[in-house]
Image: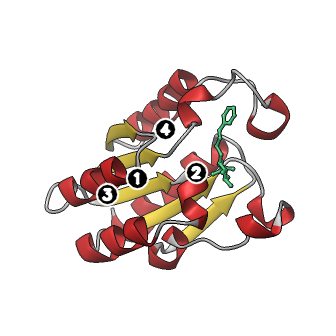
Amino acid sequence: MKILVINGPNLNMLGIREPGIYGSQSYAALVGFVSDVCAQHGVKAEFFQSNHEGAIVDAIQGAYGVMDGIVINPAAYTHTSVAILDALKAVSIPAVEVHLSDVSAREPFRQVSYAGMACEATFAGHGFDGYRMAVEYLIEHHG
Ligand code: CA2
């Protein structure tokens, strides 16, 4: 099984600021954590991070016919991007949404998730462990 792990804008800044919300570990540590989870399950993982909406759309399109699952934290684009929603629908690859923080307990503008409308499940508020939950969801349902 091959999984594409997509992270949206500013997640490359993890560990540098706002540790109270997003934790104190870096983006490289997140990649290491998810790589280990995937290796333990015999899953191949690829990682993509971008601050640009169109680049994320391109990455989703590039997964078509190549990847078996997508784990996506669209970050701020979660709450704004119909383009990412449409890309996920277009490729029709099983996708799971992840958020480090518990978006349901934050500002009202974070209560809407466009990308989530094309995802089979959402794990929010579990920090890095949410990515493990998402990978294991995909293995359980599509592995
Ligand atoms: O909780 C999450 O994972 C979010 O997707 C993170 C986004 C936020 O816009 C979503 O509502 C919830 C923001 C990511 C920003 O990451 C930073 C990392 C370090 C310092 C500042 C921001």
Query: How dense is the environment of label 2, judged by Cα within 10 Å: few (below 14), some, or many (20 and up)?
Result: some
Q: Nearer the viewer, mark 4 or mark 2?
A: 2
Q: Residue 110 or 30: which is nearer the viewer?
A: 110
Cα distance between the residues tagged 1 and 2: 11 Å
Task: Give the residue pinned by disc 3.
Answer: 57
Residue 53 circle label: 1
Task: Give the residue pinned by disc 2.
Answer: 75
Q: Please, which residue is most extreme toward the left here? A: 65
In the rendered image, residue 57, in percent from the top left (x then y), is placed at 31, 57
Cα distance between the residues tagged 1 and 3: 6 Å
In the rendered image, residue 45, in percent from the top left (x then y), is placed at 33, 40
- The residue drawn where x is 35% and y is 74% is 86
**Ligand 1: does it lie within 8 Å of the C-beta at label 2?**
yes
Tell me if 68 is positioned left or right of 6 in this view: left
Q: Nearer the viewer, mark 1 or mark 2?
A: 1
In the rendered image, residue 90, in percent from the top left (x then y), is placed at 26, 75
Tell me if 21 is positioned left or right of 80 in this view: right
Query: How dense is the environment of label 3, judged by Cα within 10 Å: few (below 14), some, or many (20 and up)?
Result: some
> How many numbered marks have been drawn onto this rendered protein structure?
4
Query: How dense is the environment of label 4, judged by Cα within 10 Å: few (below 14), some, or many (20 and up)?
Result: some
Task: Give the residue pinned by disc 4.
Answer: 37
Judged from the image, the secondary structure of the residue bearing numbered disc 4 is helix
| Pointer 3 or 4: first along the chain | 4
Judged from the image, the secondary structure of the residue bearing numbered disc 3 is helix
Judged from the image, the secondary structure of the residue bearing numbered disc 2 is helix
Cα distance between the residues tagged 4 and 2: 21 Å
Q: Nearer the viewer, mark 1 or mark 4?
A: 1
